[in-house]
Image (cartoon, grey):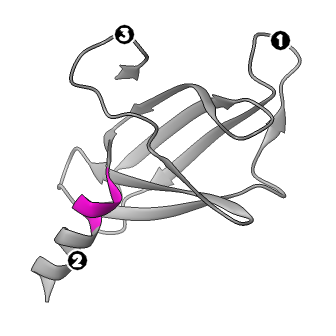
Amino acid sequence: MFWKRGKKNILKNPFYDEKDALVVYIKCNKCGYIMKKRILKSRDFVVSYDGNAAVVIDKLYVCDKCYNQIKVNAGFKRSYKPVYFEIDGGSFVSKEEYEKGKEDEK
């Protein structure tokens, strides 16, 4: 699934900036489990030499419950604002949806 500006009903920037990392909340397409993942600015980003993204990530996450593979690919400006982002095997969710899901588990 590819997310970009201009489409209706899409989640805006799914990355939450926290001092030394970006946080993203991912929902597994297979089992519906919602995970919180940190992307460290100091080691998870790779410098991009083509296109309009300064740094990129290409991450493979594994669902904590069903072991489904979820791939996240994104490009960012130097200020860590996303230029593009896509996800396969899951979907981006908001921080509020993640917290609501955690409360429901209790």
Q: Secondary structure at mark 1?
A: loop
Q: Which residue is mark 1?
A: 50
Residue at the (24%, 16%) spot, across then down:
8
Look at label 1 and name its amino acid: Asp
To which residue does mark 3 refer?
A: 6
77 on left or right of 94: right
Reading the chain from its start, which is encountered first: label 1 or label 3? 3
Pinpoint residue 28: horizontal percent, then vertical percent: 28, 50
**Residue 102: which disc?**
2
Asked if residue 24 is positioned above or below residue 4 in the image, the reply reads: below
The N terminus appears in which quarter of the rendering? top left
Q: Residues within 10 Å of mark 2 (few under 14, many from 20)?
A: few
| Circle nearer the N terminus (2, 1) | 1
For this rendering, which residue is in front, 87 or 68? 87
Chain part drawn in magenta: 94-98
Residues marked 2 and 1 touching at CB (< 8 Å): no
Residue under the point 76% across and 10% down = 51
Mark 1 neighbour density, 10 Å: few (under 14) some (14–19) many (20 or more):
few
What whole-number distance in Å separates the C-alpha atoms at marks 2 and 3?
Answer: 32 Å
Residue 65 drawn at (x, y percent):
28, 68
